[in-house]
Amino acid sequence: GHGDSKEARTGESIALDEFDSVLILADSVAIDHGADMESSDSRSLASLLIIKDIQKRLRQERVERGETPKETDPISEILDTRTRSLLQVVECAGYVMSNQIVSAAIAQVAECRDLNAVLGELLSARGNEPHIVPITQYLDPENPKENPCSFWDVCRLARLRNEVAIGYRPEEVEWADSSKTILNPANKGAPRTWHAKDELVVIAE
């Protein structure tokens, strides 16, 4: 859904407590008409605060009715790097710095043109993209013949499914600390004991 970020009724009318994910996009129309990045981020932050307030109220109503509320943290797109400190103040669980992503992609392509095909595949709406998959889809953690095993062994199992394993998230790491997800792990040949709630990061269709 979409609407005016200053109008709380917009959020209430689309049942924000029922969504699996909520992404707040920067106001591209305002930017096209001359608004600066700081102004766009201000609108995104206003939307974030309104959405979090509505979600809190709707979750409380569900609790009062004896229902289990769904926990969904909104993710905001920001354009100005200086906005990141404000996101911590409003307890934003995640954000997307789209300008930084685009700049990094352009810089990599400038250094190596072959990366253009790789980034085009990963960042397009179709084709291969990153996925988070339970490790149990590749091995049985309770089977001593399969576990422990090295990351290279898991990569081989992923290749059998036409996937490329690039990292994993140990079960003890919460998504609030998703920056601790291990990508391109060191000591790939060292045996590791995998747990049922471990998750593998793969590139797949």
Image (cartoon, rainbow, N blue to C red):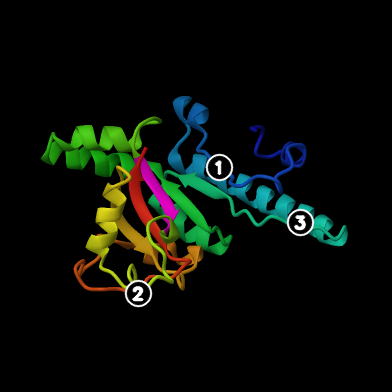
Count neighbours of disc 3 (C-alpha within 10 A) and say few if under 14, some if 14 to 19, many if 20 or more. many
Q: Residue 59 — which label?
A: 3
Q: Earlier in the sequence, mark 1 or mark 2?
A: 1
Instruction: Identify the residue at image location x=21%, y=32%.
Output: 117
Image quadrant containing the C terminus: top left
| Quarter of the figure with residue 121 | top left
- The image shows residue 175 at horizontal and vertical percentages of 49, 63
The residue at which mark 1 appears reads as: 24
Of residue 76 and residue 172, the one placed in the foreground of this image is: 172
- Stretch in magenta: 129-134
Q: CA distance from mark 3 to mark 2?
A: 38 Å
Instruction: Classify mark 3: helix, strand or loop.
Output: helix
Instruction: Classify mark 2: helix, strand or loop.
Output: loop
Q: Earlier in the sequence, mark 3 or mark 2?
A: 3
The residue at which mark 2 appears reads as: 193
- The image shows residue 160 at horizontal and vertical percentages of 29, 47
